[in-house]
Amino acid sequence: MLRILLTLIVFLSAGLLFAGQETVFVALSGNDTNDGLSEVNAVATIAKGLEIVRNKNIKHLSIKGKHRIETPIVLTPQDSGLVVTGHGIIDGSRIITGWKPYQNGIWQAEIPEVKEGKWSFRQIYVGGELRHRAKTPNEGFYRVAGCPEGTPKTVSYHTDCQSFEFKPNDINPNWKNIDDVEVIVYYFWSDNHLPIESIDTKKNIVRFKYKGGKTFTDDFSEKGARYIVENVFEALDQPGEWYLDKVAGIIYYMPKEGENLNEIEVVAPFAKELLRIDGKPTDNNYVSGVTLQNMSFQYCHFEFPAGKVNDSQGSAEVTAAVHLTGAKNCTFTECTFSNLGTFGMELKSGCSAVNITKCRFENLAAGGIRINGGGSGSNPLTHTKNNIISQNEIANYGQIYPSAVGIFVQHSYGNNISRNHIHHGYYTGISVGLFYGYGRSVSRDNIVEYNHIHHIGQGLLSDMGAVYTLGLSHGTIIRNNLIHDVDAHGYGGWGIYNDEGSAGILIEKNIVYNTKFACYDMNYGREITIRNNIFALGQKDQISRTRGEKHMSLFFENNIVYWKEGILFKGDWKDETYKYYVNPNKPEGSDWKWNFESNWNVFYNPNLKLEEVKFDGVSFDDWKKRGHDKNSIYADPMFVDPEHFDFRLKPESPALKLGFEEIDLSHVPGQ
């Protein structure tokens, strides 16, 4: 009873303390001549509200209603400790009005700011829903007809190319405002957005203003890449499409059935950013203790700088609506980021202990959250570290830039990425690390756990994983994640993907199923432990590795691999042994070692007898004679209901007898 009374007293005291704090109120019904110190005396603008809290050293700002802004809200070190609440909406759009019929079911509106060169945009939203620019073809893709600058057979696939041959009539030099027409090429893991420079009608060659980053082929094949042509006035022939004539300053839109442009709101993004938290980490001058709760951020605009075409991995060239630099102990909770022409948030250099929790990111042109800071060798004050990204939902991302990532950790360490629900994107769900090969990387000690990642890839791009790593990542742990329905275009719809130089990672207690390619894939890496996972129902293969090297690449132990089609072990699983340093007590300083170890696993295909199963092209007995899986078995793991993806184990499961531990998914959202 005493403990209950003490708890109640503390709770009431905290409530009284908060009630006694001064608050500045911002509301659409307010007036900037008011003092803002009560709801009835609210000010009308966020700028005025910030002015008052700064002048009076008040630390609580309540924002209600939708506030349209054209330049970002900026918080600096003087705003440390500020708490912003109130269910306010920060809106970076402008309303497009003055619609009138044009012809053939198309409507038009004049926008003087566009004609004057003061405004341009890539998205419009009708009734809050994204509408796409007029494009051709309406369905599917065109194919590059020829690659005069080379193909993977003749040059490196990473050759920057600036032109390709098209089939007759696919691209027309007589299109209106040809300088504003954009060719979007989908190939490898990229979507390049290429403005046209010139068209040779005799040879059917289109040349672009800037170079794309790869050969214009369908991945590594000789076949031409897929592409569409966007912002074509003559292609405005489908309800829901629009075209912006920048020269005349006129927007054209073909309404969908039931849309009355005199009654429904049409907006386009104007602001390039919505919020910046600007500390100066190299001066040890941080923005600390800022909290935003129940705020919404919507509509912002992005254009590629000259020379950029979105060739960086993960759409890293695309900016974010909310930027944090030099932020410490700041919190975003229960906020919404929607209908954005960018990423949702970016933590830049010198951010630490930032907590992004219980937020929703939806309908995004790019990805949800990007974390990046100084790389190896940079000033330690620029390092970004120890942030928490938890209990967020990231849905329908990559709508304009499909190579964007749900949560993208570039150069950063010590982050916890947990209990997030990431789904319906076109590329990787969570990406950790951005250094190719075995050079030093600051990306280490990141924890990726209890996330639910599903229905990503969606068949558009290649070379992706639900969880992707790149480069040295010592201390990084990927555990207790639920991953399923990963679908790539040509290759690489993987569940967990350790790409070039991944090293020092523990992968355990994940459930991965329904992937187009392997549930687990390694390109090349070092000393990765994969244990106590369930890998099930890969379509083309189950476990894959591109190449072995003269070191221990992976330990594959105590896993369950369950499949009905495709290859069990795909890629390079050679039995070569290498003499490399493992025991300093031996006179020669080295031992003969395999470059991978596999043991204590359960393998099972309900459609195949053991003698029909091939382990890297040989029988299970011969595989064991090669030194692998000496204690592993081929047996039904006895899942509760694998047909309905219930991978719990029955008590009599043989996997439990081998030491397999049940996987706890109770903290995984969205099941």
Image (cartoon, helix red, strand yellow):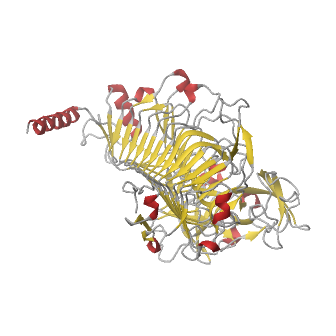
Query: How far across and down, in percent of the image, does residue 195 sit?
Result: 74, 56
> Is residue 348 positioned above or below 197 on the image?
above
Residue furthest to the left in view is 1
Closer to us: 126 or 666: 666
Above or below, 243 relative to 51: below
Residue located farthest toward the top when viewing the structure as drawn: 283
Viewer-proximal residue, 80 or 459?
459
508 vs 318, left or right, is left
Q: Decide which of 655, 188 is in the foreground and name it.
A: 655
Left/right of residue 663 with respect to residue 461 in the rendered view: left
For image coordinates 37% across by 28% down, the residue present is 54
User: Measured along the vertical axis of the image, is residue 366 above or below residue 20?
Assistant: below
- Quarter occupied by residue 552: top right
The C terminus: image quadrant = bottom left
Q: Where is residue 394? Give x, y as percent.
A: 47, 55
Image: 345 above or below 667: above
User: Could you say which is closer to the camera, residue 506 or residue 82?
Assistant: 506
From the image, which quarter does the N terminus lie in? top left
